Amino acid sequence: PAMGPPPFPPMVPQAAPQTTDIFTALQALVGSQPVAPGPAVSVSVVGLQFQYDLTEDDLRAVFGEFGSVLSVTMQANGEAVVEFASTEEATKAVQKLHNEKLPEIGGTMRVIYTRNQPVEEEEPEQSMKCMRFDLGRGLFHGEPQFCVATTILGPASRNVYHIMHEALDAVDIRLRGIPSRVAPDGERLHLLVVSQGTHAFQTAVDLVEDLLQSVREKFKSWAAAKGFGIHQMMDLAITKREVDYATSWQQ
């Protein structure tokens, strides 16, 4: 049969407090407002005719039956705060042990959520990453017969949607600029990839790089079939550089 949590060890009676009613003091401490569940619980034994100090070893043995105990803090008023790894584990302890009778010492367990719950540290929000791909001016010698933008996008923008899907829809991709070989370098057609997730960003960057290389090979085959000269096949480079998201994406 399943064993319950181990009982507290035998108690050694101590001198009774002169004027303190433990139960009344606890009621005043808790107050009348409900306490929101959290991973930390306040533990005390009430209704005793003598003072009993909880020990850390006792608490770790008992509360360890309900989950991972991160810490036990002993307090001067005889109470203790037990912090679990999760609220779910703390809830199990509250449901099982609160108001549990301890016939060995004639007391009652009081296990309640503490008002001073530990503050969970939020994971730092990652900044937006933005990669810019620039296309050499030679790739635009065939405009508009060989449309670089249309070739990049694919039918019904299928190429871009495929990359976004592979990156778990955690990236944005945008074409910017003028599709012309005479456009200034900074204003010529380029492609931006932006994401807040490191893995999604790298996946999309790798796929875009493969896509642009395939577009370049298609242009070279098309240009050769059209009889383009060597001077028209120069500057077909594809370069990439990480840029500032705020200034590049939101322009």
Image (cartoon, rainbow, N blue to C red):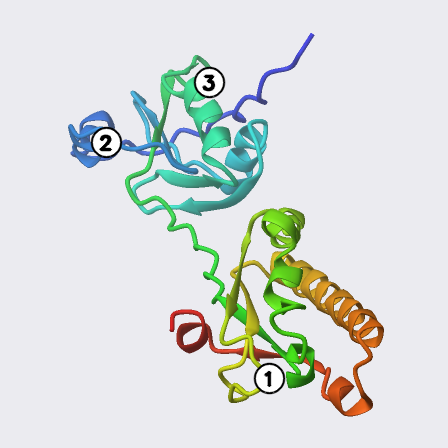
Q: Is residue 161 visible?
A: no
Q: Which residue is mark 2?
A: 26
Distance in Å between CA atoms under marks 3 and 2: 20 Å
Residue positioned most to the top: 1
Disc on res. 48:
none
Mark closer to the chain start, 3 or 2: 2
Residue positioned most to the front: 227
Disc on res. 181:
1
Q: Mark 3 Cα within 10 Å, few/some/many (few <14, many 20+)?
A: few
Q: Position of residue 222 (x, y in %)?
A: 79, 70
Above or below 249: residue 238: below
Q: Position of residue 130 (x, y in %)?
A: 53, 70
Q: Mark 2 Cα within 10 Å, few/some/many (few <14, many 20+)?
A: some
The residue positioned 61% from the left and 54% from the top of the image is 160
Q: Which residue is mark 3?
A: 96
Q: Position of residue 250 (x, y in %)?
A: 39, 70
